Image (cartoon, rainbow, N blue to C red):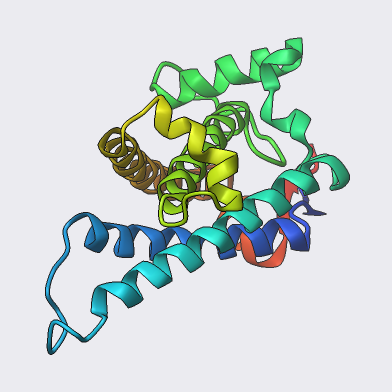
């Protein structure tokens, strides 16, 4: 019977930014839906209900942007599991081999699952694409936000985007990205739960403790 080896995989900054971003995304989605489809839920028109919802949305946006920046920084100073190279498995022959094997497992072509300590090759590639989606969300969101203060610092940095895309186009892109992120979150939870059952390495608990277990052989 194989012995289990306990490995410290996810460092504290990775776990903290993960859960901070989870809370930020949930807050942004809920408040974003209200902003896109305003409802009168206050006691009166002067209740400033939508004002508070917008304030929560903007605050969560700043938190999310900072959390993403910290995670990006840690991809250069953290361990090998959080390193930026882990998000580009196709750069190496071994990475391409594992990506093909994992894809075959996901698509029910093969029953054999290549075990990995950190992110598997398919997941890491997906996370990089989602990171780009996050950047698009941040840029479109803060561009819209900058319109409240023409001539301000943020508007000087992002205002040029409004010369390419109209306000309504930016809102449509921003809103569409939200639904793509919600779709990713659903798939992310399902995939982690599936891998936790199949690999029995403690993927779900590792994002709380930082530790995963692997068979020594």
Compared with residue 28, is residue 53 higher up or lower down, i.e. above or below? below
- Residue positioned 19% across, 85% down in the render: 46
Q: Nearer the viewer, residue 151 or 75?
A: 151
- Residue positioned 53% across, 46% down in the render: 155
In the shown orientation, is residue 14 left or right of residue 154? right
Q: Residue furthest top?
A: 93
Q: Residue furthest bottom?
A: 43
- Residue positioned 72% across, 44% down in the render: 72
Q: Position of residue 176 (x, y in %)?
A: 30, 38
Q: Residue furthest front?
A: 151
Look at the image and tell me whether residue 215 can be seen.
Answer: no
- Residue positioned 56% across, 53% down in the render: 152
The number of discs equals 0
Look at the image and tell me whether residue 172 can be seen.
Answer: yes
Figure quadrant of residue 114: top right
Compared with residue 62, is residue 198 higher up or lower down, i.e. above or below? above
In the shown orientation, is residue 214 left or right of residue 61? right
Q: Nearer the viewer, residue 140 or 161?
A: 161
Q: Position of residue 27 (x, y in %)?
A: 40, 66
In the shown orientation, is residue 150 left or right of residue 29? right
Pick the quarter of the image with the C terminus: top right
In the shown orientation, is residue 39 left or right of residue 192? left
Q: Position of residue 151 (x, y in %)?
A: 53, 49
Q: Position of residue 78 (x, y in %)?
A: 84, 48
Q: Nearer the viewer, residue 83 or 177?
A: 177
């Amino acid at each position: 019977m194989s012995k289990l080896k306990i490995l410290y995989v996810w460092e504290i900054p990775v776990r903290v930014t993960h859960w901070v971003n989870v809370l930020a995304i949930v807050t942004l989605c809920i408040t974003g839906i209200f902003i896109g489809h305003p409802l009168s839920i206050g006691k009166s028109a002067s209740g400033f209900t939508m004002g508070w919802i917008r304030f929560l949305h903007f605050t969560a946006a700043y938190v999310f942007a900072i959390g993403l920046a910290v995670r990006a920084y840690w991809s250069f100073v953290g361990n090998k599991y959080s390193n930026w190279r882990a998000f580009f498995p196709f750069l190496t022959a071994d990475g391409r081999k594992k990506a093909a094997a994992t894809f075959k497992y996901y698509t029910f072509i093969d029953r054999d699952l290549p075990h990995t300590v950190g992110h598997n090759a398919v997941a890491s590639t997906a996370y990089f694409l989602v990171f780009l989606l996050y950047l698009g969300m941040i840029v479109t969101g803060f561009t819209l936000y900058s319109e409240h203060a023409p001539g301000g610092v943020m508007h000087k940095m992002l205002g040029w985007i409004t010369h390419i895309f109209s306000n309504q186009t930016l809102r449509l892109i921003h809103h569409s990205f939200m639904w793509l992120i919600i779709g990713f979150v659903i798939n992310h939870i399902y995939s982690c739960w599936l891998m936790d059952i199949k690999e029995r390495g403690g993927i779900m608990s590792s994002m709380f403790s930082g530790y995963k277990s692997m068979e020594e052989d």
